[in-house]
Each structure stands twice: as C-alpha cells, then as structure tokens.
Image: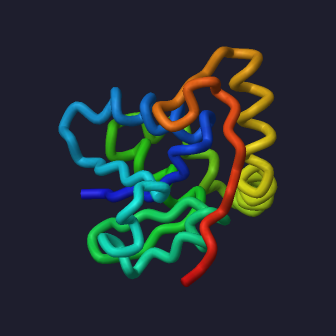
Amino acid sequence: MLSIFYDGNCPLCAAEMNHLKKSDTNNVITLVDINQPDFEALYPDVKFQDAMKILHGHYNGQVLLGLEVTHRAWTLVGKGFWVAPLNWPVIKTISHWVYLLLAKYRHPISSFLAKVFNMKTADCPSGSCAVTPKKPK
C-alpha cells in the first residue's frame, strides 16, 4: 500500500492524483490531502512545510520523496512504462532537478494551466487558488 501526501490546493497536483486514482483498479494507493484541517494530528511524521516543498509518500515502511513517489505510484497501477525513464542514469538527475523546480512553482504553473484547461479542485472551484501557507506551530 502506498500513501501519497499531496497538495490538494494545487489544481495540477489534484488532477494528477485523480488521474492516478482512476488507474488504481486494485486500490493500492491512498491519497492524503495535506491541506485537510487535521492533517498534522493524523500524520505527525509528515511535516506540512516539508510536504509543501516536495511530494511525500509512504510505501512498505519507507519514506519516498518527489519522483520516487511518482515512479512507485504509476508502477503499482501498471503504468510504470510511462515513468521508467525517470530512473535511467543521467535522466534521473535532470528529471529530479526539473521536478524540484516545478514543485517550487506549482501554484503559479497550476493557476495558469487551470485557466487554460479549466481545471478545478474541490477546494479551488475557480481553478485558481490563493496560497496561504500554514504557519508552523
């Protein structure tokens, strides 16, 4: 079982998770929106600020980060061939840096793409969300 901790206020992120979940016919992936009110109480081992910087996942007692989560998720749903190149030498290093850049600017990118493709999320019905990061306790 893979648990993915994702930013549900990011239309692009939510769209990918919805697409992934549609392919999850064996129900092996649990999606957890890090913006839910009780997130920190339910998942004290995943820090909100860290999860806002990079995608987090838990798989068989291991913590996965970034593209490791993406690769594992799509492999579990039988679509690993889509993401296999992400683990190839040289490409792995480049794709990791590209991922970190996209993750950092996912809200402006999502806002632009949401407007262009009319993407919406439950928490962002307009497809364009103001980002107000939670303050650490």
* Side of 18 where 126 appears, left or right: right
In the rendering, at what x and y percent does residue 111 appear? 75, 33
Foreground pick, 82 / 11: 11
**How many discs mark residues in the rendered view?**
0
Colour pattern of the rendering = rainbow
Q: Residue at x 61, y 22 (%)?
A: 119
In the rendering, at what x and y percent does residue 123 appear? 51, 37
In the rendering, at what x and y percent does residue 3 appear? 34, 58
* Side of 27 where 76 appears, left or right: right
Q: Which part of the image, by quadrant, shows the N terminus?
A: bottom left
Among all residues in the image, which is located at the extreme left? 26
Q: Residue at x 47, y 58 (%)?
A: 34
Q: Residue at x 74, y 26 (%)?
A: 113
Among all residues in the image, which is located at the extreme top? 117
Location of residue 130 by image quarter: top right
* Side of 70 where 24 appears, left or right: left
Please say whether residue 90 is visible from this viewpoint. Answer: no
Foreground pick, 120 / 13: 120
Q: Which part of the image, by quadrant, shows the C terminus?
A: bottom right
Please say whether residue 38 is visible from this viewpoint. Answer: yes
- Vertical placement of residue 21 versus 72, above or below: above
Q: Residue at x 42, y 35 (%)?
A: 20
In the rendering, at what x and y percent does residue 35 appear? 49, 55
